[in-house]
């Protein structure tokens, strides 16, 4: 059995998931990630922008637009087609991995908490 390497880190996965519904700027990504992860993942600003920069270079996200708010530039990011495909692939990989554990747990008579 070959071991599949995750396509994305957990922060990258949730950042891309946050962009599924449309473009967001940094703070919006941070709040959406916190919400969709049920508060389990709280991104630091440096983590977010480092991840966005790497994902932009690799074509997973793109700058959608910039605007000036209270004298500061606000950059919005959007999911690219490659980003959406990568997110789907990673979600499927995790679903398949979870199914193995859930199936084995049922067979062993382990109940869910």
Image (cartoon, rainbow, N blue to C red):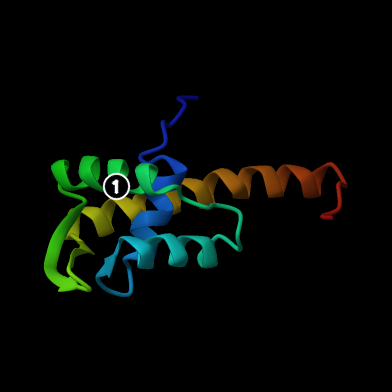
Q: Is residue 82 above or below residue 50?
A: below
Q: Is residue 9 left or right of residue 21?
A: right
Determine the residue positioned at 61% across, 54% down.
40
Where residue 18 sits in the image (x, y, percent)?
A: 38, 64
The secondary element bearing badge 1 is classed as helix
Q: Mark 1 — residue?
A: 49
Quarter containing the C terminus = bottom right
Determine the residue positioned at 70% across, 48% down.
103
Residue 97, located in which quarter of the rendered image? top right
Where residue 72 sits in the image (x, y, percent)?
A: 19, 65
Q: Is residue 24 left or right of residue 98?
A: left
Q: Is residue 23 left or right of residue 106?
A: left
- 106 or 93, which lies in front? 93
Q: Residues within 10 Å of mark 1 (few under 14, many from 20)?
A: few
Determine the residue positioned at 38% across, 49% down.
45
Q: Is residue 60 above or below residue 17?
A: above
Q: Is residue 40 left or right of residue 85?
A: right
Q: Is residue 26 above or below residue 86?
A: below
């Amino acid at each position: 059995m070959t071991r599949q390497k995750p396509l994305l880190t957990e922060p990258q996965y949730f950042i891309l998931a946050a962009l599924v519904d449309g473009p967001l700027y940094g703070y919006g990504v941070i709040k959406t990630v916190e919400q969709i992860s049920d508060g389990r993942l709280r991104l630091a600003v440096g983590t977010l922008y480092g991840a966005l920069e790497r994902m932009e270079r690799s074509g997973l996200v793109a700058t959608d637009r910039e605007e000036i708010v209270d004298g500061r530039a606000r950059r919005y990011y959007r999911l690219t087609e490659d980003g959406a495909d990568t997110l789907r692939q990673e979600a499927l990989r995790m679903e398949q991995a979870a199914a193995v554990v859930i199936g084995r747990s049922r067979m062993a008579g382990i109940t869910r908490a």
